[in-house]
Amino acid sequence: MEQRFICSNLSDGPNGHLFFAGQDTVSLAEKYGTPLYLMDEDLIRAKCRLFRRCLEKYFGGHGNILYASKAASFKRIYEIMREEDMCVDVVSPGEIYTALKAGFPLEKAWFHSNNKSDEDIAFALDHGIGYFVAESFEELNAIDSAAAERGIRQKVLLRITPGIDTHTFEAVDTGKVDSKFGYAIETGQAEEFLRLALSLDNIELQGLHCHVGSQLFDSDVFIRSARIMLDFMSHVRDIYGFEAQQLNLGGGFGVPYVMSDPKPDIDKIMKETAEEIHRLCEKHRLKIPDIGFEPGRSMVADAGLTLYTVGMVKKIPGFINYVSVDGGMTDNPRFALYGAEYTVLPADRMDESRNMVCSIVGRCCESGDVIQPSVPMPEGMERGSLVAVCTTGAYNYSMASNYNRIGRPPIVMLSGGESYVAVRRENLDDMLMLDE
Ligand code: LLP
C-alpha cells in the first residue's frame, strides 16, 4: 500500500483534521496556542528501545547508545533518556547542566565539542562527567592538568577523522581530512594525538571516536568508517600495545523529510555494520571493542511536528503566493541555513484539495525567513488556518533563536493520548530577562 504520510504517527482524523500521535492537532493548537512544537514521547521511547535492541542483537549488548542531545536538549528529554537507560552526548556546560537538573547520571555522558574551555573542562570534571571526547592537543593537556589538580584519572576518547566524504551536505560533513573536528589518520596527526594521550598520567585512554556526517541512509559510511578505524586500532596496537576498549562510530542515521527521501532501516544498518566489525576484528585479531553509536536526528526528528497559525495569504498574480505564519526562522532556521526540505500540511483542511502552490514564510523581518517554498495548499487557506510542518523534532527547538525578540514556542509532549507542557512558551518578560 502506498504510504500516505511522511511519518508513521500522522493520520487523518474525522472532520478533515490532521492527527499526530493519535491526537487532534487542531484541538492541541486551541489548547496550547501557536506556534507550537509537539513531541511524540512514545515514539522517542520506541526509538531508544529499537537502538538498544539492535545493540543487544548484533553486539551482544557490548557498547552504548548515546542520544546526541544537540538534536533536542531540554530537561524532559534527559529524564526520558534516563528512564530508557540510554547514554547521552553533550557538547556544552548548558547541555551538561540541563542533564544534571533532569537527574541524568553524568557518568553516562560523553562530552564533545571541538573547543572546550578550561572552565568547561572544570565544570564537567566537577560534575563527574563519564567521558571526554577530546579533539585537540591543547584540550588533552588541559584535561590532564585539571584532572591532576583533582587527583583523578579522566576517561577519554579521541576524536579521529577517518577521511570520508559522505556526499550529504557540506554543513554536516565532519569526517573529511580538512574538518575542524579531531585529527586525521592520513596526516599522521591522529597517531601523534594518541601518543600524547598515552603519555599523560591523568588521562585514561578508553578508545576512539569518529562521526562523519548526517543523513546517512544505509550502512556504507558506517562500514567504511569502521574499516578505517579498526585498521588504525590494529596499527596502534602493534606499535604502542594500546588496545582500545571503546570504538564510537558517531551518529548520522538519516531521516526522511519528504516522500522522495529514502527510508532507512536502522536494524539493517546496525546488523551490516556489526557483521563487518566482527569480520575485521577477527582479521586483525582485535578484541571487539564496546561499540558506541550516537544518534541524534533519528531519535527525535519524526517525533516532532510544528503547528502555526496563518496570518495572511498574499497572492501576487503571475509571480508567487505567500502564506505567512506566526513563527518562522526563529523556531526553524533549517531552510534558511541549509535549504532543508520539509513536508507541510494544512492541519485543519486535510480533506480539501491542494491546488495553490505557495511559499510558507515566517514573521521575521527578512526575505530569507522561509519555512518551505513551493508547497501545495488548499485555495481556501486564510487567516486563522493551521499549518503543520512535519519532522521538526531535531535541530529545531535546539537551533531556535529570539531574533526580532520573538519568544520560542513551548514544547508539548504527547503520550498515551495525553499531553503536557515540557518547555513553556517564552513570554515578553523572558525577552527582557538578561537586560540590566
Ligand atoms: N555525534 C557527533 C559528534 C555529532 O557532531 C553529531 C551531529 C551527532 C553525533 C548526531 O548526528 P545525527 O544523528 O543527529 O545526524 N544542525 C544540523 C545537524 C548538525 C549535526 C551536528 N552533529 C541540521 O539541522 O541538520
Image (tube, helix red, strand yellow):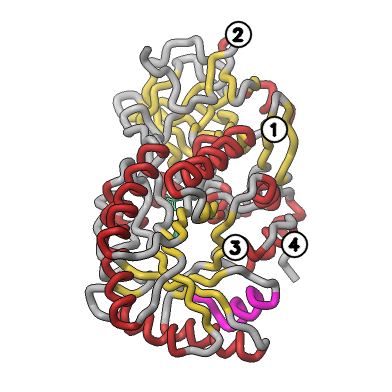
Residue under circle 1?
Answer: 33
In the image, 221 versus 151, the foreground residue is 151
Residue drawn at (33%, 54%) of the image: 277
Q: What residue type is labelled 4?
A: Met
Disc 4 is placed on an element classified as loop
Q: In this view, does 224 lie to the left or right of 310?
A: left
For marks 3 and 4 on the same chain, the one whose residue lies earlier in the sequence: 3
Give how far apart the Cα atoms at labels 2 and 4 are.
42 Å
Residue under circle 2?
Answer: 15
Residue drawn at (30%, 56%) of the image: 170
Q: What residue type is labelled 3?
A: Ala
For marks 1 and 4 on the same chain, the one whose residue lies earlier in the sequence: 1
Give how far apart the Cα atoms at labels 1 and 3 are.
35 Å
Disc 2 is placed on an element classified as helix
In magenta, the rendered stretch is 115-126
Q: What residue type is labelled 1?
A: Gly
Residue drawn at (30%, 65%) of the image: 285
Q: Which of label 1 and label 2 is nearer to you?
A: 2
In the image, 401 versus 419, the foreground residue is 419
In the image, 278 versus 92, the foreground residue is 278
On screen, 343 above or below 124? above
Is the CB of the residue bearing disc 1 within 8 angstroms of ligand 1?
no
Q: Which of label 2 and label 4 is nearer to you?
A: 2
Looking at the picture, how far across and down is residue 182, in whole percent?
Answer: 37, 72
Residue under circle 4?
Answer: 433
Density class for disc 3 (Cα within 10 Å; few <14, some 14-19, many ≥20) is: many
The reply to whether residue 38 is visible in this rendering is no
Magenta portion: prevailing SS class: helix
On screen, 370 above or below 116? above
